[in-house]
């Protein structure tokens, strides 16, 4: 039997070695080098190559290579098998720190002062008096981020699909809840999974409900944001700034307007990176679950798409 790593355009040799150590009884293969497609039972995948699934008729389990699963269905529908994702507790800590760091940077104008330093400009300015953060998505990453911001003195709200109660966090849900939260958010952080319902959620209409001094932080997926709507809202001074870690096209094309925009900060999809050791542990565990016919850990709900 074999486990296939289908993560095109990335060097997966180290992962192959670590998985072979963790699961010595099976063959660990890297796409497109497949000895016998009939023997592939488990696929670890990210951005699946075209026609991957139709050549693998015996798949019993699928796992995303990361926390998100949107990339799995990019080209073709998935085979009928349970789908899991990687849930790395350290990832949530890293994401929370990234969001806190970016908000503090914005609030204290550190980036502005750094730009002024290049021009030898001595122009003291008071920090932004903004402390209300609205978080779209209260899952593994959103909840941790909300808690850390709260511990650091921010007034935090969150929005989710289902109704929630979380200590010290004002929780919203539903379309009306979204608008209500937006109205009182100095910072709006997107930590939603990318689904049909959430695609393009960061759009001009939503931006108009935010205060004019608001800052958008997108750390989920590039497709959550309508890029031209962001540029329009910034040009019209309907919002103040944006911090983006994810983009519609990654790497961000060299001629993209975001690179040099004075009110947009870009980072290269680096806010939280899954550790290879967590991937190995969780894939080995799930392979064993699959073999014993037990439910996988960190399963997603295929109907909800996350
Ligand atoms: P979870 O699945 O744990 O949480 C998702 C949250 O979004 C839940 O609270 C869910 O609501 C909410 N949600 C989903 N759909 C809707 C909707 N239609 N309306 C309102 N709320 C909705 O995901 P994670 O926190 O683990 O990760 C979130 C995303 O972050 C990932 O999908 C991935 O795309 C991105 N990510 C980005 C990284 C980066 O480096 N930039 C790194 C890792 C992940 P409910 O609780 O009711 O189900
Ligand atoms: C993920 C990511 O989903 O890195 O894990 O974006």
Image (cartoon, rainbow, N blue to C red):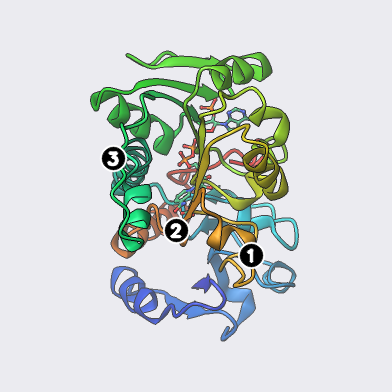
Viewer-nearest residue: 39 or 211 = 211
| Residue 29, horizontal then vertical, whole percent | 49, 79
For the C terminus, the image quarter is top right
- Look at discs 3 and 1 and give the one toward the viewer: 3
Whole-number angstrom distance, CA of label 2 to CA of label 1: 14 Å
Question: Where is 106 relative to 70, above or below?
Answer: above
Dot in front, 2 or 3: 3
The residue singled out by tag 2 in the image is 267
Q: CA distance from mark 2 to mark 3?
A: 26 Å
**Residue visible at 55% across and 42% down in the picture:** 300
Residue labelled 1 has its Cβ within 8 Å of some atom of ligand 1: no
Question: Badge 1, how many Cα within 10 Å: few under 14, some, many 20+?
Answer: few
Residue 128 visible, this orientation? yes
Name the one closer to the observer, 17 or 194: 194
Q: Residue at x 38, y 17 (%)?
A: 169
Residue position marked by numbered label 1 in the rendering: 256
Give the residue number, with chain letter if any, for mark 3.
124
Is there CB contact under 8 Å for labels 3 and 1?
no
Closer to the camera, 295 or 205?
Answer: 205
Task: State which quadrant residue 291 falls in.
Answer: bottom left
First reached walking from the N terminus: tag 2 or tag 1: 1
The x and y percentages for residue 85 are 48, 50
Q: Which label's residue is closer to the chain start, 2 or 3?
A: 3
Q: Nearer the viewer, residue 59 or 4?
A: 4
Looking at the picture, how far across and down is residue 183, in whole percent?
Answer: 57, 18
Residue 164 in view of the camera? no
Is 81 above or below relative to 210? below
Label 3: element kind: loop
Describe the element under mark 2 as helix, strand or loop: loop
Q: Residue at x 54, y 18 (%)?
A: 181
């Amino acid at each position: 039997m074999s486990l296939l790593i289908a993560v095109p355009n990335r060097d997966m040799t180290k992962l192959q070695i670590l998985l072979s150590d963790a699961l010595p009884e099976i063959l660990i293969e890297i796409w497109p080098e497949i000895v016998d497609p009939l023997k592939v039972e488990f696929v670890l995948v990210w951005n699946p190559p075209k026609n991957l699934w139709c050549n693998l008729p015996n798949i019993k389990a699928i796992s995303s290579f990361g926390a998100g699963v949107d990339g799995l269905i990019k080209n073709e529908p998935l085979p009928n098998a349970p789908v899991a994702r990687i849930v790395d507790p350290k990832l949530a800590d890293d994401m929370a720190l990234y969001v806190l760091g970016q908000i503090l940077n914005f609030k204290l104008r550190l980036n502005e002062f750094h730009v002024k330093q290049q021009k030898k400009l001595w122009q003291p300015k008071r920090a932004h008096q903004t402390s209300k953060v609205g978080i779209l998505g209260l899952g593994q990453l959103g909840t941790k981020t909300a808690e850390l911001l709260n511990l650091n003195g921010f007034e935090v709200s969150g929005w989710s699909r289902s109704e929630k109660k979380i200590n010290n966090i004002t929780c919203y849900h539903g379309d009306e809840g979204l608008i209500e939260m937006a109205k009182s958010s100095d910072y709006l952080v997107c930590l939603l999974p990318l689904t049909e319902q959430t695609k393009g959620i960061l759009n001009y209409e939503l931006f108009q409900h935010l205060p004019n001094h608001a800052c958008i932080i997108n750390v989920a997926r590039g497709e959550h944001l309508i890029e031209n709507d962001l540029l329009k809202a910034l040009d019209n001074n309907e919002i103040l700034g944006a911090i983006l870690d994810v983009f519609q096209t990654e790497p961000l094309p060299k001629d993209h307007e975001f690179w040099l925009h004075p009110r947009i900060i870009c980072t290269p999809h680096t806010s939280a990176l899954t550790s290879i050791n967590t991937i190995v542990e969780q894939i080995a565990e799930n392979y064993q679950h699959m073999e014993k016919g037990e439910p996988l850990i960190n399963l997603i709900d295929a109907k909800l798409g996350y």
